[in-house]
Image (cartoon, rainbow, N blue to C red):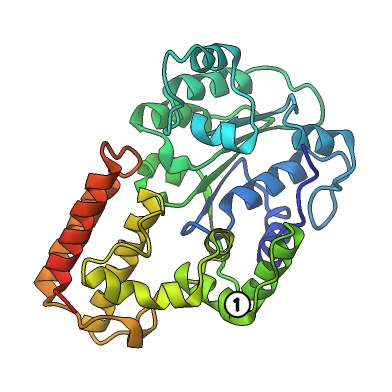
Amino acid sequence: MSVPSPLAPWLQQQLNTLVRQRGHAFLLHGPSGLGQYELALALARAWLCEQPGEQGACGSCNSCHAIDVRTHPDMAVLLPETLSLELGWPLDEKTQKELEDKKRKPSRMIRVESARDVIAFTQLTRARGASKVVMVYPAEQMNTESANTLLKTLEEPTGDVRFILASEAAHQLLPTIRSRCQAHALQWPEPAVALTWLQRVLEGENLPSADQRSLQTWLRAAGGRPQDALNWGRTGLTESTWSRLPRAMAAGDWALLADWPASRQLDVMQKLCHDLMAVATGGSPRFFDAAHLPPPPPWAVLARWSRELLEAARTVDHPFQPALTQQAWAARTRERLGTV
């Protein structure tokens, strides 16, 4: 496991504030793409560090190294199994064997069994340092049973356990969970700061240097969320493609996004719907340039389309027939927006 990259500047500023605060449970919340996971992990490292400073963990002690290689005995992470595998966090032996034997697929939700394991972890004596840390991300992926399993420990924690819950949809959490935590809303970076960070990260990944026009396209496509912009940059999205998408989609032409995953296609449809609703009410679009948008249909049509897209989001990770799904989306988008 490599040493983590330096925190983005807007996250470092927030970490400097958080490390000075007291409390046993924090809820870091905000829209996706602002760095909830990175900030949560940095705060956990600071809490467990043997030589913490005003800006967080030292990065060189045994505790910091143990977190970097995912073996710290006083830290537990509560993640969906799919995300644990993606981020390199180990699964328990039983789960690992079930997945290796293909008895089931990795869960996209935080399973109640994992929550119970975390509760058992909190009841053990700490191995080193002054505290133990539990990190939950994304917290909204806990179902009611998982959340209720965690709730009692949040209400009556042992003296040496601290919790960090990070969420991209805090409104989906149980009110009782939210009320047990100190809430911290993640800050949005200034566009210039986000663009500088985006360029630096891309260069660090040995990707082709991007011009300012491309960087601005990615940031706009992400609605100002820098980490989402980074994901767009990694796809090689061009300004030409992004500007042509709205009218092409309105005409039922799916060629520009046909090779994208279903989740990304749905994301673009939702962004187009958002911008058309904004324009229809006299506002400004957020994701696309106004000049590139087709004329908005009546509000009732947009509202119905928005509800349909929300419904589609429930099953977007499990498209049964991707080709047929694309055809249906293209036809429905043309139907809702009309031929341009």
User: Looking at the image, which residue is at 34% across and 88% down?
Assistant: 291
In the depicted structure, whether residue 255 falls above or below residue 144: below
Write down the quadrant of residue 275 in the picture.
Answer: bottom left
Quadrant including the C terminus? bottom left
In the depicted structure, whether residue 50 falls above or below residue 6: above
From where the camera sits, is residue 315 visible? no
Q: Position of residue 69 (x, y in %)?
A: 77, 32
Mark 1 crowdedness (10 Å alpha carbons): few <14, some 14-19, many ≥20: few
User: Looking at the image, which residue is at 79% across and 41% down?
Assistant: 2
The answer to whether 235 appears left or right of 133 in the picture is left
Q: Which is nearer the eye, 135 or 175?
A: 135
The answer to whether 109 appears left or right of 207 in the picture is left
Q: Which is nearer the eye, 173 or 140?
A: 140
Q: Amino acid at mark 1?
A: Glu
Q: Which residue is mark 1?
A: 190
Q: Position of residue 251 (x, y in %)?
A: 21, 72
In the depicted structure, whether residue 336 falls above or below residue 290: above
Q: Position of residue 336 (x, y in %)?
A: 14, 68
From where the camera sits, is residue 98 visible? yes
The answer to whether 134 appears left or right of 29 in the picture is right
Q: Which is nearer the eye, 22 or 127?
A: 127
Q: Position of residue 101 (x, y in %)?
A: 50, 11
Secondary structure type for disc 1: loop
